[in-house]
Image (spheres, helix red, strand yellow):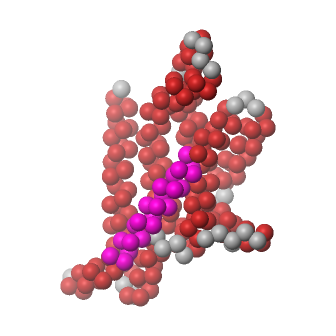
């Protein structure tokens, strides 16, 4: 017990600093995912065949290939074209592209779940399509997508661990480093698990509460 407490005192502050990087990765990647996801959603629903086709290819391509492969293409593969990204930038771009594909499907499902009559009523009142979407459809869709989107955020937090492979100093990278120094893998990785639980568990509880509230309505 004393040995574990000593390990905790020695390595936990070091690993905990990785939580800051994990949260930074998550926040910036979420912003990118939302922007890309909305663009892909509107492209698919625009009725313009070329835009819908391009968005469909992007979504299927991203969802059909491993995120780790995409990270390696962005970080290592682009060097063939003279493009060298910092590890943090490569991780954010990759997670944004991956997240955007999944977010697009969440957004599309939420928008399509809104009664079509709401849109037709807004148009009959003289609203343009963008205005009707912004004032009528999206606020209602936002309520619908909130539970699955919260789960999406949790998944993205966990996916930031992929950045370990390109030396971004997030939780898993620092845990691996501490484990290599201490040779106490179980103790070190349990510290990482505690940090992930501290971040993800409140969000998970929040998502379940939202789902129960929606089911009761």
Q: How many marks?
A: 0
- 115 left or right of 197 in image: right
Instruction: Judge by depth and name the residue closer to the eye, 9 or 133.
Output: 133
Of 81 and 205, nearer the camera is: 81
**Could you say where residue 185 lies in the image, as x and y percent from the top left?**
39, 81
| Residue 184 can be seen, yes or no | yes
Q: Residue at x 36, y 71 (%)?
A: 16
Q: Percent position (x, y) of residue 38? A: 60, 40
**Is 144 left or right of 63, judged from the image as shown?**
left
Position of 83 with respect to 28 (left or right) is right
Residue positioned 53% across, 33% down in the render: 110
Q: Is residue 186 left or right of residue 58?
A: left
Magenta stretch encompasses residue 88: no
Of helix, strand and loop, which mostly describes the magenta segment?
Answer: helix
What residue occupies the far top of the structure in this picture? 124
Q: Position of residue 22 (x, y in %)?
A: 45, 64
**Quadrant location, the C terminus:** top left
**In this picture, is 28 found above or below 56?**
below
Nearer to us in this view, 125 or 77: 125
Quadrant in which the N terminus appears: bottom left
Where, by quadrant of the figure, is residue 76 drawn?
bottom right
Is residue 32 part of the magenta span, yes or no?
yes
- Taking the view exactly as shown, the residue that stands out farthest to the left is 2
The quadrant holding residue 181 is bottom left
Vertical order, 125 against 198 (above or below): above
Residue at x 47%, y 28% (from the top left corner):
140
**Magenta segment:** 13-34
Q: Residue at x 65, y 42 (%)?
A: 40
């Amino acid at each position: 017990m004393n040995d574990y407490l000593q390990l905790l005192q020695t390595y936990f502050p070091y690993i905990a600093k990785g939580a800051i990087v994990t949260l930074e990765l998550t926040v910036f990647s979420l912003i990118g995912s939302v922007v890309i996801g909305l663009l892909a959603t509107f492209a698919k629903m625009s009725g313009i065949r070329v835009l819908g086709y391009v968005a469909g290819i992007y979504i299927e391509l991203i969802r059909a290939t491993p995120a780790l492969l995409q990270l390696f293409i962005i970080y290592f593969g682009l060097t063939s074209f003279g493009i060298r990204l910092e590890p943090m930038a490569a991780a954010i771009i990759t997670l944004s592209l991956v997240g955007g594909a999944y977010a697009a499907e969440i957004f599309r499902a939420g928008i399509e779940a809104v009664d079509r009559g709401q849109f037709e009523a807004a148009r009959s009142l003289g609203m343009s399509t963008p205005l009707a979407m912004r004032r009528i459809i999206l606020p209602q869709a936002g309520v619908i997508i909130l539970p699955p989107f919260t789960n999406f955020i949790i998944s993205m937090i966990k996916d930031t661990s992929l950045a370990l492979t390109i030396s971004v100093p997030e939780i898993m990278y620092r845990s691996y480093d501490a484990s290599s120094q201490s040779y106490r893998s179980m103790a070190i990785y349990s510290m990482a698990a505690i940090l992930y639980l501290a971040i993800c568990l409140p969000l998970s509880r929040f998502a379940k509460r939202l789902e129960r509230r929606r089911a009761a309505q």
